[in-house]
Amino acid sequence: MCGDLIKRQEVKLEPLFKLQILETATNNFDISKKLGQGGFGPVYWGKLPDGQEIAVKRLSRTSGQGREEFMNEVAVISKLQHRNLVRLLGCCVEGEEIMMLVYEYLPNKSLDAFLFDSLRKGQLDWKRRFNIINGICRGLLYLHRDSRLRIIHRDLKPSNILLDHELNPKISDFGIARISGGNEVNTTRVVGTFGFMSPEYIMEGRFSEKSDVFSFGVLLLEIVSGRRNAHFYSNELALSLIGFAWKLWNEGDITALVDPAISDPCFQVEIFRCIQIGLLCVQELAKDRPAVSTITSMLNSEIVDLPPPKKPAFVERQSSLDTESITQNQKINSINNVTISDLKSR
């Protein structure tokens, strides 16, 4: 059945794993092998007969995602290869309910497991964080410009950045990624994660490479600050992390944003530069945000003088939006009463 599905999608992917092989590799998907849980379903650690370690993502019967996202991920990531993208090894489909994706295993799991853990964030000094920022940017540049396809990821966030044994980043989870052809795309099915989606995507269903740039900007601010954008800061103003960063920027007190774990005067200039780049990426209008190729040059100081950022989107937030993911099947009305339907959680 998997072969038939792949043929219809014009995707060639080898190997196609047998269910029995994956059951043996994961000790029949024993709970002790479970690495985590995502919108698609649980992820298990396993070991193949040749000793290779793998991560098996298994579609949950209760998942809001399904065949479409499964085939989309196979179709997209099977055609991509880059050191900063997670590698898909194969898939398994048996019957109507057994759907799995098999990936390379990355021992350090996801970025959020370090970044927001008070006991582990100390392992991410500034040099490691800057390497992670650069790696994510290189992976995104490949998706937008250098791959055989032009891909908009649409769900960049810390839990979708996996870390290898040397803490090098790899972008993962391409279930809602889209081939763009370099053009802006319109949709009535808005999917993603609150706090990382650009305003034009949420309000009008328009997404482009600049939507990923917005997500990257949020991610960059989270890496520098060690704070989640989904939480409130400076409560009397109900500020998101973006709003909090913008407030501190205008007050000339950006030092207060920096995670104490990386607050080293030796790296202050580089850290402040990254905060400015992050604010440039989250500007309200898509046309004002830099392209990923420009961001790469900014990070490497090939562009020395950075422009001042304009007011970002979502400076103030209402408590009703204080949630990390969009509720499945929720309807949201924009200020001009345009309704966007089928907003689904990730």
Image: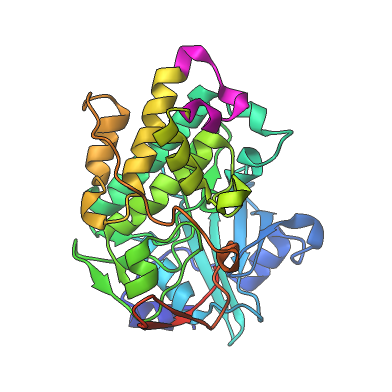
Queried whether the magenta region covers residue 257, the answer comes back as yes
Query: Is 110 or 338 nearer to us in this picture?
Result: 338
Query: Quarter-wise, where is residue 303 in the image?
Result: top left
Residue at image point 80% right, 61% down: 31
Queried whether the magenta region covers residue 55, the answer comes back as no
Residue at image point 64% right, 39% down: 114
Left or right: 222 in relation to 50? left
Residue at image point 35% right, 55% down: 212
Q: Position of residue 102 (x, y in %)?
A: 55, 61
Chain part drawn in magenta: 254-267
Query: Quarter-wise, where is residue 320 in the image?
Result: bottom right
Q: Is residue 81 visible?
A: no
Identify the residue at the far front of this view.
Answer: 236
Left or right: 182 in relation to 346? left
Identify the residue at the far bottom of this view.
Answer: 96
Query: Quarter-wise, where is residue 338 in the image?
Result: bottom left
